[in-house]
Image: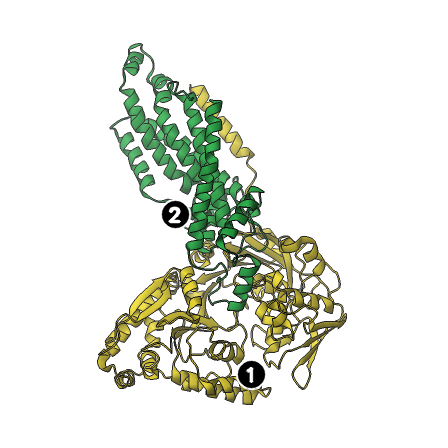
Chain colours: A green, B yellow
Amino acid sequence: MTTFIVRRVLWMIPSLLVVFTLTFVVVHATPGSPWDESEKPLPEAVKQNLAKQYHLDDPLPKQYADYLINALHGDLGPSYRSVERSVSEIIAATLPVSAQLGLAAMLFALLVGIPLGTLAAVKHNTWVDYTASLITVSGLATPPFVRVSLLIVALSLGVAWLPTGGWNGIWDVRAIIPTLAIGLGPAAILARYTRSSLLEVLGQDFIRTARAKGLRELMIVVRHAMKNALIPVLTVAGVTLSNVITGAFFVERIYGVPGIGRQFVDSVTGRDYPLLLGIVLIFAILISVVNLLTDISYGYADPRIRYR
Amino acid sequence: MRKRVALCLLVLLTVAACTPPTSSATPSPSQAVKKTTLRLPEAAKIVNTMDPGISSGGAGLEEIQNMFEGLAYVDQVTGEIKPGQAEKWTISPDGLTYTFNLRAGLKWSDGQALKASDFEYAWKRATDPATKSRYAQTLWPVKGAEAFGTGKGTAEGMGAKATDDRTFVVTLERPAPFFMHLVATWTAYPVRKDTIDKNAEKWTLNKDTYISNGHYRLVEWKPEQSMTVEKNPNYWGENNGPDTIVWTLFDDQAAKSPVAYEAGELDRAVLVGADITRAKADPVLSKEIKKFERQGSQWIILDTTNPPFNNVKVRQALSMATDAKRLNEVVLKDAYFNAVSIVAPGIPGQKTSNALGYDMAKAKQLLSEAGYPDGKNWPANVKFTFASGAAETKAIAEAIQGMWKSALGIDIVLEPMEDKAFDNWRTTRKDQPFHMYVSGWGSDYEDPNNWYNLLFDSKADFFYAHWKNAEFDSLVAAGLKENDPAKRKTTYESADKIINAEAPYITYYHWARFDLIKPYIEGLNHYRVLGRIQGYLVRVKK
């Protein structure tokens, strides 16, 4: 197990380098300057001075090497567009917000998705199943930015229960709409996986044996079927987790949540290269770690899996 | 099992009960009786610096203007230059030396005395290339400033000097009748050396280090979320505006501010495009819409050295075949003001009678004289380039394409580009040919220099139309030096006539601003230049 983990961690280094190099090449091949922000163009002399001050006129290999050396020392550089905050500071301020929101959405997805899927499987081909399917299919069919807009229309403008946007920490009412908007998608996915996986398990011999022993149905589902049925769900949950904590880009933008997903979108459209590179690196690390954790958790959930 | 479920529920309820009570960014009604708050929208994306010396004046300018004051300011109702931190100033007869006398007892928001040396420091700092100012060129008319700003001179060589605590003397490179407008610009606001030395670029981030000198001072800035300011007790004048101003920062304020406004979270919303039409049809909102003039022109720039646009008759024909009235009123649902001439109204020199106007018959005749009767022999692949980010530009491009096709029988190819790619392409037009593209200009200050000299003079050629006219150049050069306002105006009027007749630009609307303003808000005004809201002029009657 330890060898497995060490090997996986070491493999992260070349993959991060590849991700970084590809991003660096792509952003520098994309035309545009970070400083044309207003509705009319900036004078050339000013742009030239800025390019010089930020070393954007250095040859690309030098810029690449400089960035990499600084990044290894923990310095992700200045943000071109944010004068007062460096890339590291922006990430430190925004990642926790996205992570909190992502975890809340994931919790919501688990608490809603798994029971919903279970209910659909147990009440297979009844109106309960059909209703659950309707909910999950609509959850899968609408992208998060559509859901967030619909939720604002319904909950903020319609019944006026919640504000139309903003952020005041995860315990504030402002967290409800983004949590729902992000969480409904993963909830639907988890429900679908739980349902199909559970249906398969419920048809197996050991379940029939349990029923023959005269166990109560609830006990059969919870104790015997679920443990087996949840293994594929675990895989999906891992992938989903890395998706939600890296920020639901458009939900954050639309609802005005100061998360990292919003910074990611802005850094692309605004050509803020250091910020974009910094965020991509952080995302790459996060995704690798979550994938590793998912793999490790199999070992505990499924006794058939052994790591060498 | 049932017990367990009950236990779970109990735990959940306890958690919910322990959750801290929800607080809202706006004060509760009981507070509002004593204190007034103005709630405004702002674009989050580019509030990336609150440093007056660095800001290029996009989003964030409104907050900076409310918190700082320069030696003079532009009256946001009349447009006149009024004394701010300086009680008066004198200009030497040769127009080269400006002596500013500061008011007695000026203070920074933290109570420390504000001195003329603070201006000297701020001006030199903004000019220093190491400051990375996005608007350094504002102060370049000052002697030695351009040299210093481009790395060829030193701070000491700059003609800005505090001779005592209340006297600030500025020497110019050459006479500039518009200089007081620059003095009123945010780049020329004073900033405090000690806080900048101590906190470097982070001085703007919190209320203890963001020391200002205007009507308001900072309470809190939450990046990408909100900014709150309160009345500055150390401001020299009086301030009868709201006690607090809160800006909510939106990624897309045009999309989000009307929603927040309708939910009662904002006192003002920004309206564009389809929302204007929707609000006009709404029984409540239609009474709260207000349209403001912005001194700007949206135009098509023609490459006057590239065929077929090197022929003046072709340019005139296209200009005359462009129905600006229909573009604004029908295509854009009256979101702007109908174009009257190349330069926006209000700039001395601009004269509507100089414009070519809309004249289909004349346009046909001119095109035929140019060798393209009914569009025959018109070259293939004449490109109309624009940034695709704004849906409106695409609608306009298609409308113009159709208009020219039906009026003149010519084909043009639309070439949309991603916004940043377009900026990059535009920059390289300096020495590369093109056919035509869309851009615009709005006054930084209300003076002909900001248009005729800065944009159209053949040495400046800001938009790369590659248009050269010796007579125009000499007229605007003379206008720049002329100190008599009446003579200056007629000089620029002659130049205006030339550029309109030569048609290197086709203006298709003048800028505007649409707001929704709550009925209990009074005095909220956007002046046509820059037009940021000044809190001290607003009354919240709620």
| Image quadrant where one finds the C terminus of chain B | bottom right
The residue carrying pointer 2 sits among few (fewer than 14), some (14 to 19) or many (20 or more) residues within 10 Å by Cα, namely many
Q: Is residue B43 visible?
A: yes
* Residue A81 at x, y percent in the picture: 53, 56
| Image quadrant where one finds the N terminus of chain B | top left
* Residue B191 at x, y percent in the picture: 67, 63
Residue A273 sits above or below residue A199 on the image: below
Residue contact between numbered discs 2 and 1, judged by CB atoms under 8 Å: no
Numbered tag placed on residue B60 in the rendering: none
Q: Distance between the Cα atoms at labels 2 and 1?
A: 52 Å
Residue B116 sits above or below residue B229 on the image: below
Q: Is residue B462 left or right of residue B104?
A: left
Q: Residue B80 appears in which quarter of the rendering?
A: bottom right
Q: Nearer the viewer, residue A2 or B7?
A: A2
Numbered tag placed on residue B480 in the rendering: 1
Mark 2 highlights which residue? A145
Tag 2's secondary structure?
Answer: helix
Residue type at mark 2 is Phe
Q: Residue at x 68, y 58 (%)?
A: B211
Tag 1's secondary structure?
Answer: helix
Q: Nearer the viewer, residue A300 or A153?
A: A300
Q: Of tags 2 and 1, which is closer to the observer?
A: 1
Q: Is residue B336 left or right of residue B247?
A: left
* Residue B495 at x, y percent in the picture: 47, 86
Q: How many marks?
A: 2
* Residue B368 at x, y percent in the picture: 25, 84
Q: Residue B279 appears in which quarter of the rendering?
A: bottom left
Residue type at mark 1 is Leu
Q: Residue at x 49, y 84 (%)?
A: B473
Residue B263 sits above or below residue A143 on the image: below
Q: Nearer the viewer, residue B120 or B281?
A: B120
